[in-house]
Amino acid sequence: MSTTQGRGRLGKRLSPYLLTLPGGLWLLIFFLVPLFTMLSLSLQTGNPITGVFHLTWHWAEFGQQLSLYHTQFLRSVAYALTATALDLVIAYPLAYWITFHAGKKKNFFLLMLIIPFFVSFVIRTLAWEFILSDQGFVLGTLKNLHLLPQSFHVLATGTAVVTGIAYNFLPFAALPLYVSLEKIDRSLVEAANDLYASKRQAFLRVILPLTIPGIFAAFLLTFVPALGDYVNASILGGTNTTMIGNIIQNQFLFNSDYPAASAMSAILMAAVLIGIFAYAKMLGARTIEEYV
Amino acid sequence: MNEEEEIQFPGLDPALWQGASDRRLSRRDLLRYAGAGAGAVGLSAFLAACGTSNNSGSSGGTGANAVGSTSWWAKQKLHHQVDFANWPYYIDTSHGKHPSLEQFTNQTGIKVTYSEPIQDNTSFFQKIKPALQAGQSTGYDIVVLTNNSPVFSQIIQAGWVIPIDHSKMPNFDKYASGLVKNPSYDPGNKYSMAWQSGYTAMAYNTKFIKENITSVQSLFDPKYKGKIGMMSDPQELGSFGLLATGKQPATSTPADWQAAANKLQAQKSLVRSYYDQSYISALKNEDTWISMVWSGDIFQANLSGFKDLKLVIPQEGAMFWTDNMMIPKGAANPLDAMTLMDYVYKPAVQAEIEDYNNYVCPVPAARPIIAHKLKDPTVANSPTVFPDAQMQSLSRTYYQYKNNQSLLQWNNLFLPIIQG
């Protein structure tokens, strides 16, 4: 009796650890090991040709990279923020409409939202490059009709890059918003109406606050990949639209300067983490105080 | 003459193959980005995963029995297979097969595993570097690298290329053009044999530009603001900056580089974008009207219907580059590789490859075969495929980096222009 009980207790105590083991191992092998390799690499110096680097705790690398590439760094933040804002503004009404007004066709509309994204990211971006080309069938036609000046162009501008990013990451904003809107208990909205709230008030004081976690998720899922993106800038961009992702790629491929590339990646990662924690704290605090 | 009889064409007119495929056009653009879909977030983790090894590049010794020495080569045997890594769309292709290679297999019994994993020199080098560092086989017996890339001298300096066997290249000795024999980037062809060469020149769209363009200065002409395409490769861009400031890239000094960088920086507001291989679609889409180009691309574009694009070899000269076959250290089948590398120097074989490629042919004797047997006078008479005396006098060679310091100095001057 007592031994069975003992084994039961042991099993009970170990089970949480055993259950987290697969996930934990995954995290260790595919996240922590690469992460620490990268951090260690960013502090190494050596010969890029033979690829022999030694850990020399070369902290100056971070300062050097920041002073060389702060323009591109700030530009990436600005582009990513603009694209994310654009996505939220487009995706919220979209998700709202699908949730409350699409009726039985909800799944159909959700599918329509995702289907374009079954095509490779790069192919879609290249397609935009073709569609928006200066003498292509859109701009070319408008120019022939004298609706646009000959010098007008969309490609090779910052706007093209931001729009490209916004387009490519739209579902990442729309889907979390849909999930959080869908979760809302309809009786809460009815209660607001019963208490003489106007439609606008019901939205602003009931629906919107309840979807803040969704907005946060949508923001994260869009902003983080957008910040590191380098495909849109290299396909749709021009001379002054380089993003930090392009810089990292070039440091890695052209200069074979792994420490520089790693340092830059580490800076990017740290900036994102700090930003996200600050943002979560801000939103989280509001949510707790006012709405729970 | 015997060689001419060796090639049988499997039913299809070779002129058709080149029209049906637009080879080097998409060589670097589509494929280069194919991996990008994996997600930009993954980039830092990807970088991290490519950590370094502490193995120093093994020199392989210098003794009489060292890898690549005469006695080492004497011990090598044929294994009847060879792994050839090349750039996409860079060999004659018909119905998914490569007639020249099939012919080689029929004649020698050596089976060729032909793959096209190289989209640009540096990233390919990064891929095979871990194996080379660890002293293991890269899985390839022949790789093709460009002399204008820093990677070319890096891989030799690190001792990762097997010196080729000069007793087993009779066709090369007999037929190779002076342009690729004993080149300055590999004196005495110690490590390499040319696959194809080409020019980095310029082209413009005659639909929009009516004047006759003859000089690289036209790339700096404010008239064409926003319609000028430059290349994003720092070696290509820097070399053109040097030509524009009247310097010879091969003999230039860091002071010249600075002047060239200043000139390119001033040009920046006129430039639409700094392109990789995608410059060709920008030209075809008419996003750019005048651009730096690779000669074969324009030749192909003209053949495939873009007749308004005109290739210009500027009076200041055009950069002449060569893609070279090399045997990486650790190759499993070096003798088979040698056999194939020399085989493509047979005029009849080269004619077939060249009629597809349209870059600069390393075998002048292939010309009459292309003209008469393959009946393709356009290719045979093109000065950018078979350079004439005038063309050769306009050929410029790239600066060879003395060491990593000079490479970094170069990149630090020209990369900021591209990455602004």
Image: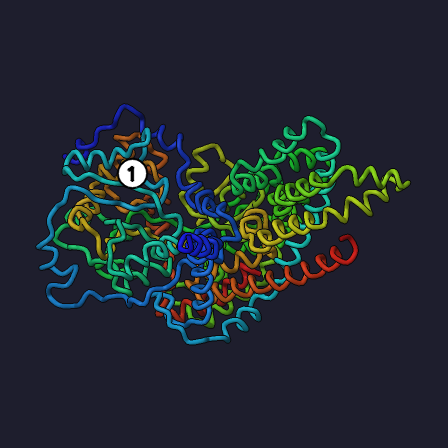
Quadrant where the image shows the C terminus of chain B: bottom right
Kind of element beneath mark 1 = helix
Point 64% across, 41% down: residue: A175
Q: Amino acid at mark 1?
A: Ile
Task: Identify whether B216 is placed above or below A137.
Answer: below
* Left or right: A14, with B376 as reference point: right
Q: Residue A180: percent from the left, percent from the top?
A: 68, 43
Task: Identify whether A188 is placed above or below B128.
Answer: above
Q: How many marks?
A: 1
Q: From the viewer's side, name the closer residue of A232 and A185.
A: A185
- Whether residue B393 is visible here, answered yes or no, is no
* Left or right: A241, with A264 as reference point: right
**Toward which corner of the image does residue B152 lie, by quadrant?**
bottom left
Task: Identify whether A186 is placed above or below A53.
Answer: above
Q: Residue B208: percent from the left, percent from the top?
A: 59, 41
Task: Identify whether B119 is placed above or below A123.
Answer: below
